[in-house]
Amino acid sequence: DVKVTQSSRYLVKRTGEKVFLECVQDMDHENMFWYRQDPGLGLRLIYFSYDVKMKEKGDIPEGYSVSREKKERFSLILESASTNQTSMYLCASSLHPVRPGEQFFGPGTRLTVL
Amino acid sequence: GENVEQHPSTLSVQEGDSAVIKCTYSDSASNYFPWYKQELGKRPQLIIDIRSNVGEKKDQRIAVTLNKTAKHFSLHITETQPEDSAVYFCAASIKTGNQFYFGTGTSLTVIP
């Protein structure tokens, strides 16, 4: 049973703070993804990674960076949090590096930036 | 890049009726089309998917159809039950990529 976990369910930060969101998967998946979910906008891809130390920009990478030092862990970093980054952040992982397949999601982190 | 549109944004049906959610995509290279269900406060979970070499797939009360020529795919839920109430997302993925492009979601309410 695939398990994707995220470090926090709820997080409150102040404008300008550096924020780290951590995601861990335990099924040796190659691919990992970070999305943000906003009402009426669906899930939008921020960054993804198909291998350790590899990263690719998604549709909305501005204001974010990522780190993948180990296969099981994918971190999302907000260098200087802003109020428009208040959102639900979802991490996901999938097995195959090339052939699209099911993405397994974490429980989400609801981030509020004051 | 790919653009996925999803309709309707909200849908209410009586218990026992059918529900249909439609999505269109723009990139003819897309070849994998999953549907996710997200219950309130929970993570999205895959309920059914279809690849471009198949026109229809069914799993009990849920079916997905794909029309590659028209670039649209639909989710059909028959004999709806209150536990089907959730937000449903369609997505498309292109052949050589790992990215999913999600629709904006449909909030389905099944009225007992």
Image (cartoon, grey):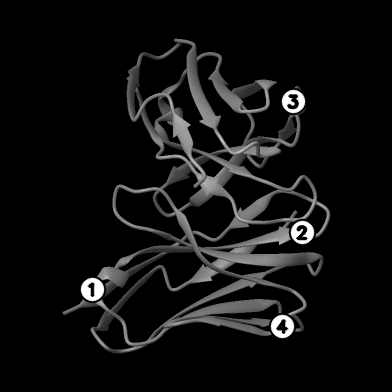
Q: Are marks 3 and 4 on the same chain?
A: no
Amino acid found under the numbered disc labelled 3: Val
Could you give the CA–CA distance between mark 3 and mark 2, rounded to whole angstroms?
22 Å
Structural crowding at the residue carrying mark 4, measured as other residues with C-alpha within 10 Å and reported as few (<14), some (14–19) or many (≥20): few
Q: How far apart are marks 1 and 2 (CA)?
A: 34 Å
- Mark 2 to mark 4: distance in Å? 16 Å
Horizontal relation, residue B52 to residue A87: left or right: right
Does the residue at mark 1 contact the one at mark 4 (Cβ under 8 Å)?
no
State which tag comes first along the sequence, 1 or 4: 4
Residue drawn at 62 percent across, 73 percent down: B24
Q: Mark 1 belongs to which subunit?
A: B
Question: Which of the two discs, 1 and 4, sits closer to the camera?
Answer: 1
For label 2, count other residues whose C-alpha is less than 10 Å away and answer few (under 14), some (14-19) or many (20+).
many
Is A90 situated above or below B13?
above
In the image, B12 versus B49, the foreground residue is B49
Residue at left offset 61%, top offset 77%: B73
**Label 4 belongs to which residue?**
B70
CB atoms of marks 1 and 3 within 8 Å: no
**Is there one chain holding both mark 3 and mark 2?**
no
Residue bearing mark 2: B94
